[in-house]
Image (cartoon, grey):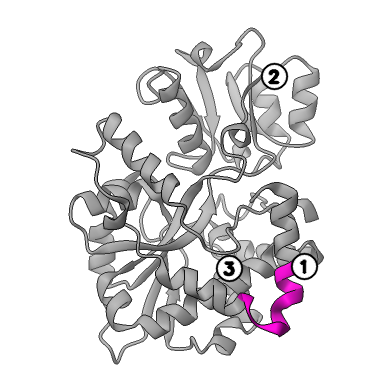
């Protein structure tokens, strides 16, 4: 961890370009500067591989000396806190599911139980779509680790590549997550809808969070507060469809600069609707019920020795204060109004 006279060290746990955009928006649009957050260093290329995050997060944070980590899976920080790691959730970062995400299955498969022994398409181990489907499978009595086969391919990223639908049609997989216009066509062709996450979580369910060390929360509180204010403003900007062209250009720039082969070829922001419906919590809120449910699920599935209190993992008072602080500013009301309109339209 940084000493008081060193810049705060921020890293992205996830290597995806999409998880880097908020930081770059805050830099390019001047939000960090305006909020007084200038003494920092940022590493966006990924702290730890997704499959290793659950058990390796705290060690990676310690070895790199990090203070703030973005894009951390909720299950990972819950597991780490259960082991006594000096890390806490300070705000939300992403909801699990896009509003247009739906899961379709091969003809003849009527429900999730029908996926036992079948192949399911996903971008990579540990991505949010796999996490969502895994939870649903467990609830249906199917073990996602032993009773299904996961087929990993970048064509399943963001549901913008038509090849993901062809994987289902060709029988290479038996279930895929999809979105318009592909999901609508699949349904017309008889590939039934077997999971609509928005039905169960109409306001979204928190899937990724920002975490920080206790030292950062206690001893560099003002800087953390400034960081969160700037991120809120970046999220408002990122859910404004009028900024689609800029955001699409930013994504393309970051992908061209990426050293990861897959990141250079996938596409996140394919339309203004993708911007407006981005799974960004505009208030950085951490719904207590979401964390409590995750704790109970992990205990039930044997991933935790025992359940514990949400208060032992969440310290989001600064996020709450940050949202109030920026929401009260008269000059930011137009940006806030657009962000609230997006929430009204998509449910989160």
Please say whether residue 163 is one of the residues in the magenta stretch. no
Say which element carries label 3.
helix
Residue range (magenta):
327-337
Which of the pair 338/256 is nearer the observer? Answer: 338
- In which image quadrant can residue 236 be found? bottom right
Q: Earlier in the sequence, mark 2 or mark 3?
A: 3
Q: Residues within 10 Å of mark 1 (few under 14, many from 20)?
A: some
Who's the residue at 36% across and 26% down the image?
Answer: 145
Which of the pair 109/279 is nearer the observer? Answer: 279
Residue holding disc 1? 243
Q: Main secondary structure of the magenta part?
A: helix
Residue 277, horizontal then vertical, whole percent:
70, 52
- In the rendered image, the residue lying farthest to the top is 108
Structural distance between the alpha carbons of marks 1 and 2: 35 Å
Please say if 139 is above or below 84: above
Say which element carries label 1.
helix
Residue holding disc 3? 22
Check residue 169 in the rendering and tell me which mark sits there, or answer none. 2
């Amino acid at each position: 961890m940084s000493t008081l006279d060193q810049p705060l060290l921020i890293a992205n746990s996830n290597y995806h370009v999409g998880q880097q955009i908020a930081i770059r928006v805050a830099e390019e649009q001047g939000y960090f500067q305006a909020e007084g957050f200038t003494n920092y260093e940022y590493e966006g290329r990924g702290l730890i591989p997704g499959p290793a995050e659950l058990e390796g997060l705290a060690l990676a944070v310690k070895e790199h000396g990090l203070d703030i980590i973005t894009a951390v899976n909720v299950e990972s920080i819950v597991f780490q806190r259960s082991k006594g790691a000096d890390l806490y959730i300070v705000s939300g970062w992403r909801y699990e599911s896009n509003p247009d995400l739906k899961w379709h299955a091969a003809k003849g498969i009527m429900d999730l139980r029908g996926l036992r022994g079948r192949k399911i398409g996903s971008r990579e181990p540990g991505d949010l779509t796999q996490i969502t489907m895994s939870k649903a499978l467990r609830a249906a009595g199917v073990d996602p680790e032993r009773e299904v086969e996961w087929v990993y391919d970048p064509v399943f990223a963001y549901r913008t590549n038509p090849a993901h639908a062809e994987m289902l049609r060709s029988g290479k997989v038996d279930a895929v997550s999809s979105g318009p216009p592909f999901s609508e066509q699949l349904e017309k062709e008889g590939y039934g809808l077997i999971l609509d996450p928005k039905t169960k979580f109409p306001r979204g369910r928190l899937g990724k969070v920002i975490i920080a060390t206790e030292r950062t929360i206690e001893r560099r509180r003002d800087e953390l507060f400034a960081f969160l204010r700037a991120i809120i403003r970046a999220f408002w900007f990122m859910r404004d469809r009028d900024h689609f062209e800029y955001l699409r250009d930013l994504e393309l720039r970051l992908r061209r600069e990426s050293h990861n082969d897959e990141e250079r070829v996938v596409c996140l922001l394919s339309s203004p609707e993708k911007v407006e419906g981005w799974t960004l919590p505009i208030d950085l809120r951490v719904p207590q019920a979401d964390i409590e449910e995750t704790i109970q699920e992990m205990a039930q599935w044997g991933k935790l020795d025992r359940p514990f209190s949400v208060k032992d993992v969440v310290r989001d008072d600064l996020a709450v204060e940050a949202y109030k602080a920026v929401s009260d500013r008269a000059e930011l009301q137009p940006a806030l109004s657009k962000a609230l309109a997006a929430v009204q339209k998509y449910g989160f």
